[in-house]
Amino acid sequence: MEAPMSRLVTNDKSQVQVIARAATILRALEDENAGLSLGQIAQRVNLARSTVQRIVAALETEKLVIAATPNGRVRLGPTIMRLAASVRSDFVSLARPFLERLSAELHETVDLSTVKKDHLVFIDQVVGSQRLRTVSGVGETFPLHCTANGKAYLAQLSDSAVEALIGRSYEARTARSITKIDTLLNELKVVRRIGVAFDREEHTEGICAAGVALHDPLGNAVAISVPVPSLRFANQANHIAERLLATKRALEGRMNASAA
């Protein structure tokens, strides 16, 4: 005998709810290298501890989470790490032709970075063809408040979220660095309006940059930036901004087509 339609619909909703809750728990464990207790997870995701315990047990079976300490704390497991690494590698491969095209158009270096809490990590780079050019190593980290790619990311957040993430005062990397939140928030208003952020010798003297932010297929924040020696930047800033926005639109269109 076939199951009643109402029962099938209820079961489907229940299964979707479990998946959504599992995803919320996994997100709560992101960047928690020391792990969280079941009680801490329950508080963060606003679920009953018993519900968290059941879902965590299922995730442990698949090694999506593993024990972090003998006293019950858990952290992300090797399975989720492999999946994330695979998606990140796929995204870098997907983005690479767009970075190469942008670099060829501008004859400048193009960087791809991802956001890790309150800093950026460079994950790919296409070196420009100019003799005088800027190069940063893949894997290097940079602050958010004084970089073009960092400010492009911050502009996607609310003002309160910016303050919660990086505080109200910041290190001066150069004489041009923004060091107070009010000044930064005023600049982020402009970035939200035009879609591009600028670093005018705020991180490193002699180097300017423009950057845009977007999200990879997993929803992780990433940014594309073009660093340029200050001598060339003033005359190229508007053109670089236009090409960055065009590259962002093209890459987002490619990701949307892949997901369809």
Image (tube, grey):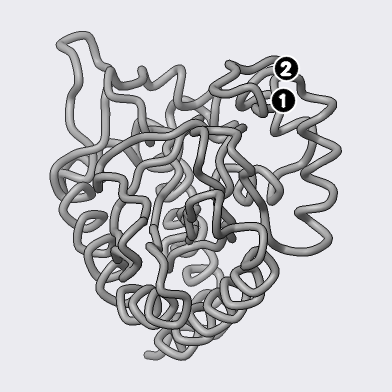
Residue 90, by quadrant, is bottom left
Residue sticking out furthest to the top? 71
Between 2 and 251, the one lying in front of the other is 251
Residue visible at 71% across and 33% down in the picture: 161
Q: Residues within 10 Å of mark 1 (few under 14, many from 20)?
A: some
> How far from the left and from the top, in percent, is residue 79?
16, 50
- Position above or below: 13 against 137: below
Q: Is residue 31 left or right of residue 83?
A: right
- The answer to whether marks 2 and 1 mark residues whose Cβ atoms lie closer than 8 Å is yes
The residue singled out by tag 2 in the image is 168
Residue 17, compared with residue 49, is above or below; it is below
Q: Secondary structure at mark 2?
A: loop
The residue at 29%/63% (across/down) is 127
Horizontal placement of 112 versus 43: left or right?
left
Distance, label 2 to label 1, CA atoms, is 6 Å
Residue 151 found in image quarter: top right
In which quarter of the view is residue 164 placed?
top right
The residue located at (63%, 51%) in the rendering is 152
In the image, 62 versus 28, the foreground residue is: 28
Q: Which mark is residue 163?
A: 1
